[in-house]
Image: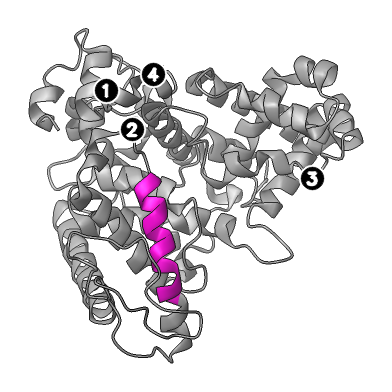
Amino acid sequence: MVGLAAIAELFGGNAGTEELEAFYPIRPDCLADIPKTRFRPRVGKTLSARRWHAAFSEDGHLDIEKVLRRIQRGGIHPSIKGPVWEFLLGCFDPNSTFDDRNQLREQRRERYAMWKTECQNMVPVIGSGKYITRPIITDDGQPIEGEDCHVTSTVSDKKVAHWMLFLHQIGLDVFRTDRALVFYEDEANQAKLWDILAIYSWVDDDIGYVQGMNDICSPMVILLENEADAFWCFEHAMRRLRENFRCSTSSIGVQSQLSILSQVIKTVDPKLHQHLEDLDGGEYLFAFRMLMVLFRREFSFVDALYLWEVMWAMEYNPNIFSLYEQPDAALDSNSTQTLHAKELKRYGKFQRKNLQNGHMDKNCALSVFLVASVLETKNRQILKDAKGLDDVVTILGEITGNLDAKKACQNALKIQDKYLKKAKKS
């Protein structure tokens, strides 16, 4: 990886592709297989390191309105993505000072170290720079012997056994994660991703680990050098996404969002919805993956990061930190009756529109309208060529590498506006 300060100096020139490749180098043997990257940092539009640092007051208060405006216009420069994401995801309060954040960061690092030690005591490979891809216990808690045996006695505690049974699956997924990136040629970086996912699954045992979390966590590991900071960034991302991963024998986590998607398409494009119903696709299960991992598979690594940060900026709620840290104190923070025009500007475009229309369904995320915008771009082809659900899946598969993230977000906002207007009339 090239030094961030050195590359930041290139911003504003014609660095373009070369600059992005310096931040996220691709293995030469994978260049032909990855989707085309469309995002480029642009002067006057992308949030640059200079603009980011200028947005802070002397004691550290952040002018979040200026930052959101810039991100929504052109994304975030690679040299500052990690720190900016921490604010977008609610890790820190824009109204806090540098000292406040340093203190909170240290507290979180200590808490993560405590959890990591707890996990290490059960499975010593955690924190060793290695990771496992083979089961370490049987279904009834018996240790599986071998040269890399990590458990020496029977595991009787149900929570511990359940956690251990998934550790090798996390390892298998880590091995497959973003394999085209040079970053993950280093086993230590893979192990860092595995450690975070293993520890998260121990801490959040209600959800545990579900395939796809690796795709959400991977960018945090790359963008934030400190492992504890990367963990907390991922943990905050999961606060908004964790219900997507809650699966059972009778339901899937994104079921509620798929229901909203069905409702949106039925409202804005009843003809397309009816056609999908006729194909037994009215439950929109073909959109499962897009919602589950936020389009990670449909875009290049760089474009997926750009899409996420623009989405999070558009969905931004200035009370997100309080909602996470002091939920009782933030119960009335979203009341549209108490928000003036100046206050509304501190919200992202998408969230602001919802507030103004009194539409506060938490499952009605921007990602739902992004899927709707994709379906709308393929409207004619689906109506003409789709004779079954397999055809719908094939048609949607054609968007990989061929979708412009910025246009998709713009179209999603237009569909949101159309949906809210029609929903209001009905």
Relative vertical location of residue 206 with respect to residue 307 in this rendering, above or below: below
Q: Residue at x 23, y 25 (%)?
A: 48
In the image, which disc is placed on residue 180?
2
Alpha carbons under labels 4 and 1: distance apart:
8 Å
Distance between the alpha carbons at the discs numbered 4 and 2: 10 Å
When the figure is inspected, residue 189 is found, relative to residue 84, above or below; the finding is below
Question: Residue 283, which numbered label?
Answer: 3
State whether residue 214 appears in this view. Answer: yes
Q: Quadrant of the C terminus?
A: top right
Mark 2 lies on a secondary structure that is: loop
Horizontal arrangement in the rendering, residue 273 relative to residue 365 (left or right): right
Farthest residue toward the top?
A: 14
Residue at 75%, 41% (x, y): give it. 284
Residue denoted by label 4: 32
Q: Which residues are magenta?
A: 163-176
Horizontally, residue 426 falls left or right of residue 58, namely right
Q: Point out residue 58 in the picture as x, y percentages from the top left corner.
A: 12, 42
The residue that label 1 is drawn on is: 28
Which amino acid type is marked by label 4?
Ala
- How far apart are labels 4 and 3 at the CA level? 35 Å
- Mark 1–mark 3 Cα distance, whole angstroms, equals 41 Å
